[in-house]
């Protein structure tokens, strides 16, 4: 799939010190802007419904030297490779909730990173709601799903030889993601970013459902995970440059009030974006019913009746930054 660049990268060389980002708030430890603008790539904009066009939920945020994934649903890892990144490049993984369409490629990410990294890179830093730690143990522990595979790769001579060829020094360590279970209100600070954990409104109490706000030197991003309309999400997203919001279905077609409460529709999302005062609303988690010519445009048009910011119809591998694209003067076409 062709990479699609919409916002930001054209302004990469000069804009980082002059961006109109939201204040980071008191007590921030985010360092001043670097020359490298934050890059956001939509890896998977689909739903649990099968689709070759839209993979399971996944987002890539590159800030400074850190490569962060937020959710890693089925197919998101394939898109990561298509984006030019590999598992070993990823430094942090955040999970909003443990619906499979948001976490099924977690195993692939950890195992490929472990295998290719050959003990030369740090273990992955993982943040997610409970039972993130249990899921990790059940996948990669000695008695876990991949326990026999991991043992074979550590102990069989052929695997040791490959490990050494990749630069490793036996004995090989087990994959050991550094898992931190998180809850609304938690703050995780990286070298040049801060993630604030918020509460989404989705399928509680069966799953803990989180939303994330990432503040970087050049701007702020809020990713809702899966959420219906929620004052908590509005508060978390306040003033963000970019809000990536679930836009699952067409307003008025929900089968029940419970469905509407758990999943975003476009009219609800318009009001969320308006109340939060974000600059750009990115629509994602899109069912086929809304992903049709003329329906797409109707949705964007109706959202703009309530929300006067920019509305972006998300696509897998779309890239966004915090600065607006510069439209070059036509010369020599
Ligand atoms: Zn979900």
Image (cartoon, grey):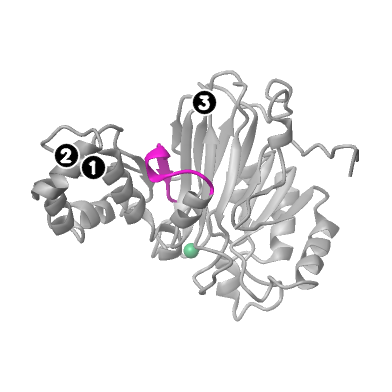
- Which numbered circle lies on residue 192? 3
Q: Position of residue 33 (x, y in %)?
A: 61, 21
- Which numbered circle lies on residue 176? 1
Residue lying at 20% horizontally and 61% vertically, measured from the top left: 145
Q: Earlier in the sequence, mark 1 or mark 3?
A: 1
* Relative height, residue 169 to residue 145 (above, below): above
CA gap between label 2 and label 3 equals 29 Å
Which corner quadrant holds the C terminus?
Answer: top right
Residue lying at 60% horizontally and 81% vertically, measured from the top left: 255
In magenta, the rendered stretch is: 83-96
Left or right? Give the position of 193 relative to 332.
Answer: left
Q: Are marks 1 and 3 in contact (CB under 8 Å)?
A: no
Q: Are marks 1 and 2 in contact (CB under 8 Å)?
A: yes
Q: Quadrant of residue 163?
A: top left
Q: Secondary structure at mark 3?
A: loop
Q: Quadrant of residue 93?
A: top left
Q: Secondary structure at mark 2?
A: loop
CA gap between label 1 and label 3 equals 25 Å
User: Which residue carries the number 2 mark?
Assistant: 173
Q: Is residue 86 magenta?
A: yes
Residue lying at 24% horizontally and 33% vertically, measured from the top left: 167
């Amino acid at each position: 799939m062709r990479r699609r660049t919409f916002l930001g990268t054209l302004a990469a060389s000069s804009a980082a010190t002059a961006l109109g980002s939201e204040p980071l708030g008191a007590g921030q430890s985010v360092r001043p802007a670097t020359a490298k603008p934050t890059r956001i790539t939509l890896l998977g904009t689909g739903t649990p419904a099968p689709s070759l066009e839209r993979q399971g939920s996944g987002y890539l945020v590159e800030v400074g030297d850190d490569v962060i994934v937020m959710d890693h649903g089925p197919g998101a890892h394939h898109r990561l490779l298509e984006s030019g990144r590999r598992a070993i490049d990823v430094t942090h993984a955040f999970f909003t909730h443990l619906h499979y369409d948001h976490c099924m490629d977690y195993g692939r990410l950890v195992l490929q990173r472990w295998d290719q990294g050959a003990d030369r890179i740090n273990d992955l830093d993982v943040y997610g709601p409970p039972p993130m730690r249990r899921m990790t143990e059940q996948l990669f522990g000695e008695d876990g799903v991949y326990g026999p595979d991991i043992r074979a790769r550590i102990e069989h001579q052929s695997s040791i030889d490959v490990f050494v060829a990749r630069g490793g020094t036996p004995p090989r360590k087990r994959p050991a993601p550094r898992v931190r279970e998180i809850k609304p209100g938690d703050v995780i600070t990286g070298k040049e970013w801060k993630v604030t954990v918020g509460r989404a409104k989705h399928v509680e109490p069966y799953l803990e459902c989180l939303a994330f706000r990432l503040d970087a030197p050049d701007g702020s991003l809020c990713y809702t995970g899966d959420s219906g309309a929620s004052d908590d999400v509005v508060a978390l997203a306040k003033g963000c440059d970019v809000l990536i919001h679930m836009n699952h279905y067409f307003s008025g077609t929900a089968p029940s009030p419970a469905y509407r409460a758990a999943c975003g529709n476009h009219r609800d999302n318009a009001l969320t974006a308006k109340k939060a005062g974000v600059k750009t609303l990115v629509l994602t988690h899109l069912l086929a019913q809304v992903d049709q010519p003329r329906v797409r445009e109707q949705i964007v048009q109706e959202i703009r009746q309530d929300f006067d910011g920019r509305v972006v119809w998300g696509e897998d591998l779309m890239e966004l930054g915090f600065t607006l694209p510069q439209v070059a003067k036509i010369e020599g076409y």
